[in-house]
Amino acid sequence: MRSTAFQRLLESMDKLSMAQIERLGDALKAARSRRAGLEVLEKARPVACRRCGSLRVVRNGHRGELQRYLCRDCGKTSNATTDTPLARLRRRETFEAYARCLAKGFTVRQAAKACSVSVSTAHRWRLRFLEKVVEHQPKALSGLLEVDETYFRISHKGSRSLKRPPRHRGGEGAGRGRKASEWAPVLVGRLRGQRYTTDKLLTRVTAAEVTRALRDVVRRGQTVVCTDGGSAFLNLEKDLGVPAKSLVVGYDGHVMDGVYHVQSANSYHERLKSWVNRQLRGVATKNLPLYLAWMRLRAWGAGGVEPRDILTSALGKQVINL
Ligand SMILES: [Zn+2]
């Protein structure tokens, strides 16, 4: 707004009735939240051109409510969400509020209510916001890496072609599904005493899959891997080229040999499973990597992850596990 027009707006305040002041107050509050959300998005924008990576980008008007940029090298225009999972989504001014819901681990219904969007929009946004975070894994860690697997019941939630009779959603049921084919293994690695987490949905817990999942996470001479000594972990030392210790549990259940345990990985499993199975009432197995990423994102912030960091991550820039 031009400064003269703004000046006139300020001067007109004296002429407002009480009812008008109330209405204006509400409008200001709404405008404030809109702007804050868009500003977070603008700040998370990468400095380079989304299309060709050139740094020679200049401001070039607005598209929707976002700043548009013109690349001097490739001549294409882009904005903060171009070529990201958040491109072409409507209601961008609500993204910041939605990131807050993700930070809190809200269900779709809770998020839809908090952001005044439909349940289907809240669900679509969840998948889009977390898409890039799946790749935001730690690399070349230094320290004691606790590695252990856990299992989630295979779920076809949301699938249109169910090949078996429908079942109650979520949770583990007593006596049901003891077959390995009904469970999806998830490998989790936690760096002892720090907030680094790696996770991977496996097809089977084999030495080859475990090695593939951990190869970039460990670093020769820097990482010591700790496991429970399961068969898939037996050759880790040779396969990864780092020391691998397995815990020894005495008959009384106490960990022998002091530091080599996987308790921090196991407590992470418990938090992950209780949130996914109870609060979120189970998730489709094909989407499980997104939920692992979501948990990893939430676990990164000591006092809760910042909405700003969630938005930046959603745009594809890694801010966790660095
Ligand atoms: Zn360009």
Image: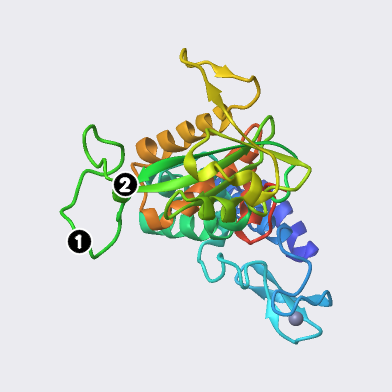
Q: Circle 2 sits in a helix, a strand or a loop, which is it?
A: helix
Q: Which residue is mark 2?
A: 180
Place of residue 44 in the rendered image (x, y in percent of width and height, measured from the top left): 71, 58
Furthest residue in direction right, as rendered: 56
Asked whether residue 308 appears in the rendered view, the answer is no
Q: Is residue 242 left or right of residue 147?
A: right
Q: Is residue 163 left or right of residue 294?
A: left
The amino acid sitting under disc 2 is: Ala
Is label 1 within 8 A of ligand 1 (CB to nearest ligand atom)?
Answer: no
Ligand 1 positioned in quadrant: bottom right
**Residue under the point 70% across and 61% down:** 42
Q: Nearer the viewer, residue 274 or 144?
A: 144
The amino acid sitting under disc 1 is: Lys
**Reading the chain from its start, which is encountered first: label 1 or label 2?**
1
Q: Circle 1 sits in a helix, a strand or a loop, which is it?
A: loop
Q: Which residue is mark 1?
A: 163
